[in-house]
Amino acid sequence: MRHPYATVEVTNPNAATSTFDVHLVFEDADDMTVNGTIEEVTVPANGTRTVRVPVDNAEESAPQVDHCDLDPVASYHW
């Protein structure tokens, strides 16, 4: 079975370590949502972190996933 994921790079322009919410939607070939997720990513000050975001419920969802849609701006996690 495939275990799809998205590789996401998050950059922190702040002078302190910060945690961000990365919003990602996995879609099928017709751009219909298969599932979505919010991943908390902690990034060091003035740094970048690359993370793998797996498809939730992969056993059921994986066969349907064709691509993902990422919100280009991660929000600060409060």
Image (tube, rainbow, N blue to C red):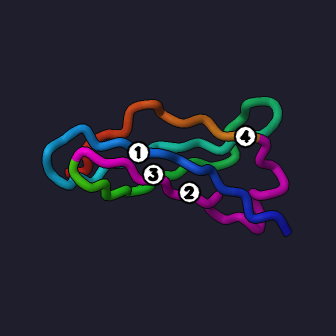
- How busy is the neighbourhood of tag 4: few (under 14 within 10 Å), some, or many (20 plus)? some
Callouts 4 and 2 close, C-beta under 8 Å: no
Query: In whole angstroms, how far apart are the C-alphas of marks 3 and 4?
Result: 16 Å
> First in sequence: mark 3 or mark 1?
1
- Disc 3 element: strand
- Give SS at disc 2: strand
The residue under label 3 is: 38
- 3 or 2: mark nearer the eye: 2
Q: Secondary structure at mark 4?
A: strand
* Residue tagged 1: 10
Foreground tag (1 vs 4): 1
Q: What's the residue type where badge 3 is placed?
A: Ile
Relative to 7, is 34 on the left or the right? right
Q: Amino acid at mark 2?
A: Val
> Mark 2 sits on what residue?
53
- In percent of width and height, residue 74 lies at 37, 39
Residue range in magenta is 46-66
